[in-house]
């Protein structure tokens, strides 16, 4: 037995717009490009520090290298030193930039700059609610690391194998 469906008439849209090929909804609005710095921070045993993205953030539950966004007018190295102070409570001395990479997410493009930390003062601790853990460089590939950070794992492994 078929039931009769009642159709309710919807009010007409007064401010109707004509969609054209140049409309952002059709043409695909440009994705924002975020400039992000991240660090390889080592402990006395040669393990590298990673942080879990907290609930409510993009890619929550995935692990990443410590760091963050570069503010307008800020240099990459200054941004990383600031981020490590804000996130981990340490004063870092940067060694060198290991590599740069670009990663496309569906809603954003991330330009990543990955640095090695030569030394730091203070004991790293989470100041923004992220879980932290130290992991052997060779074991990083087994972690749930953001795809954007995966090229850094290979760079760290290559550098570690070269004896740096």
Image (cartoon, grey):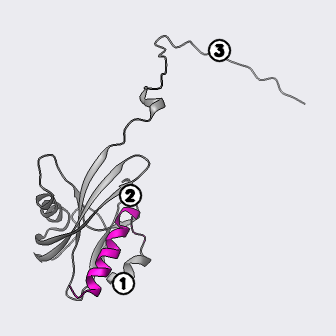
Q: How many marks?
A: 3
Stretch in magenta: 144-164
Q: Is residue 142 above or below residue 76?
A: below
Q: Which mark is residue 9?
A: 3
Most common secondary structure along the magenta stretch: helix
Q: Is residue 15 above or below residue 24?
A: above
Of callouts 1 and 2, the N-terminal one: 2
Residue nearest the viewer, comparing 85 with 110: 110
Q: Residue at x 19, y 87 (%)?
A: 44
For marks 3 and 1, give the one nearer the viewer: 1
Quarter of the image where the N terminus is located:
top right
Q: In the picture provided, is 140 more to the left or to the right than 87? A: right
Which residue bears the numbered disc 1? Answer: 138
Mark 2 is surrounded, within 10 Å at the Cα level, by few (under 14), some (14 to 19) or many (20 or more) other residues, namely few
Q: Residue at x 12, y 64 (%)?
A: 81
**Contact flag, marks 3 and 2 (Cβ < 8 Å):** no
Q: Which mark is residue 55?
A: 2
Q: Is residue 51 magenta?
A: no
| Cα distance between the residues tagged 3 and 1 | 63 Å
Q: Is residue 163 magenta?
A: yes
Of callouts 3 and 2, the N-terminal one: 3
Of callouts 3 and 1, the N-terminal one: 3
Quarter of the image where the C terminus is located:
bottom left
Q: Residue at x 16, y 74 (%)?
A: 117
Q: Residue at x 37, y 56 (%)?
A: 103
Q: Secondary structure at mark 3?
A: loop
Q: In the picture provided, is 132 more to the left or to the right than 61? A: left
Q: In the picture provided, is 51 more to the left or to the right than 121? A: right
Give how far across and how far down residue 160 sits, in percent.
Answer: 27, 84
Q: Is residue 8 above or below residue 103?
A: above
Q: In which quadrant of the rendered view does residue 113 lie? A: bottom left
**Contact flag, marks 3 and 1 (Cβ < 8 Å):** no
């Amino acid at each position: 037995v078929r039931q009769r469906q009642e159709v309710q008439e919807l009010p007409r849209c007064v401010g109707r717009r004509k969609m054209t090929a140049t409309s952002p909804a059709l043409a695909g609005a440009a994705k924002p490009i975020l400039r992000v710095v991240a660090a390889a921070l080592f402990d006395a045993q040669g393990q590298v520090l990673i942080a879990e993205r907290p609930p409510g953030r993009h890619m929550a539950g995935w692990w990443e290298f410590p760091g963050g966004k570069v503010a307008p007018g800020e240099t990459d190295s200054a941004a990383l030193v600031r981020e490590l102070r804000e996130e981990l409570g340490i004063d870092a001395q940067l060694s060198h930039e290991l590599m740069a990479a670009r990663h496309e997410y569906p809603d954003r493009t991330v330009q990543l700059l990955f640095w090695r930390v030569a030394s730091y003062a203070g004991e790293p601790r989470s100041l923004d609610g992220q879980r932290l853990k130290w992991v052997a460089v060779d074991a990083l590939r087994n972690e749930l690391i953001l795809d954007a950070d995966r090229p850094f794992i290979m760079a760290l492994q290559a550098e570690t194998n070269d004896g740096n």
